[in-house]
Image (cartoon, rainbow, N blue to C red):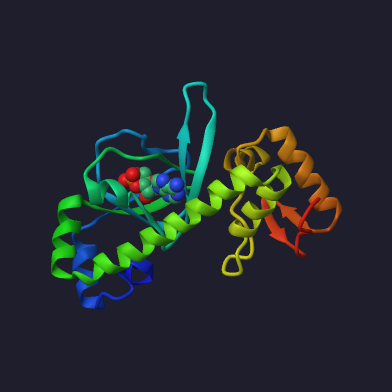
Amino acid sequence: MLEKVSLFSNIPPECLYKLEKISSLRKYPKNTILFIEGDDNSQLFVVKKGLVCIHTDDNEGRQLVLNYVGPGEYFGELSLLDGKPRSASATTVEDSNLLTISRENFRGFMQEYPELYEVLMVELANRIRSLTENVKDMALLDVYGRVAHTLERLCNPEVEISPKLTHQDIANMVGASREMVSRVMKELVLGGYIEIQQKQIRIVKSFPKNW
Ligand code: CMP
């Protein structure tokens, strides 16, 4: 399974087999809190099946969703790299099968396969680029623009269709109220730009630049 993870794409299969053997696979039901921002654990998680939400919350229960992580993707690499507490929280949003690799095992593996450092650097660079996009969206776009960009990101050509999302989930991703997001979504459906079936969104035609 690890061969499908971008991080390990350059590692020979027999070595990945070794890594898979020293990692553990566990099933987590939907809505399991895997860790909370500030926690002191540092394994790497790889999603085999299911979906995990990466989020940050304030004391009043408001949530900002930073990412959804699906099959073949990973999270938890920051604490693994710098040994500092978790930078965000992770919760399963579907029943999920996750592979965990301990910091010690992963670091030992990185020493054996230094090419992993380069892949990690490229992936961290991608993350910084996508953070820049997010900051730009938050600062410069109105709610319509933020919803449109978020839907385009979630329904990229590879997946076509989004994970199951409520209007509140989208509001948590774009930093707007549920009511505002519901209004934008309704207009997009009426305009024939998106279809929603069982909470999954499909983009039918390109969104207009402005609303
Ligand atoms: P870590 O800090 O170990 O635990 C939380 C994880 O969430 C973090 O590693 C990353 O894997 C992931 N993460 C943190 N911030 C973001 C972000 N802004 N966008 C996407 N993923 C993130």
Rendering coords of residue 176 (x, y %): 65, 36
> Residue farthest to the right?
190
Above or below: residue 42 compared with residue 128: above
Residue found at x 52% / y 41%: 65
Quarter-wise, where is residue 85 in the image? top left
Residue found at x 47% / y 31%: 57
Rendering coords of residue 180 (x, y %): 74, 36
Above or below: residue 119 compared with residue 189: below
Q: Nearer the viewer, residue 26 or 7?
A: 7
Left or right of 150? Residue 130 is left
Rendering coords of residue 163 (x, y %): 59, 53
> Residue farthest to the top?
60
Rendering coords of residue 58 (x, y %): 48, 27
Residue 198 visible in the picture? no
Left or right of 32? Residue 79 is left
Q: Nearer the viewer, residue 84 or 204?
A: 84
Q: Quadrant of the N terminus?
A: bottom left
Above or below: residue 23 compared with residue 52: below
Q: Nearer the viewer, residue 25 or 192?
A: 192
Q: Nearer the viewer, residue 140 or 36?
A: 140
Residue 157 visible in the picture? yes
Residue found at x 61% / y 69%: 157
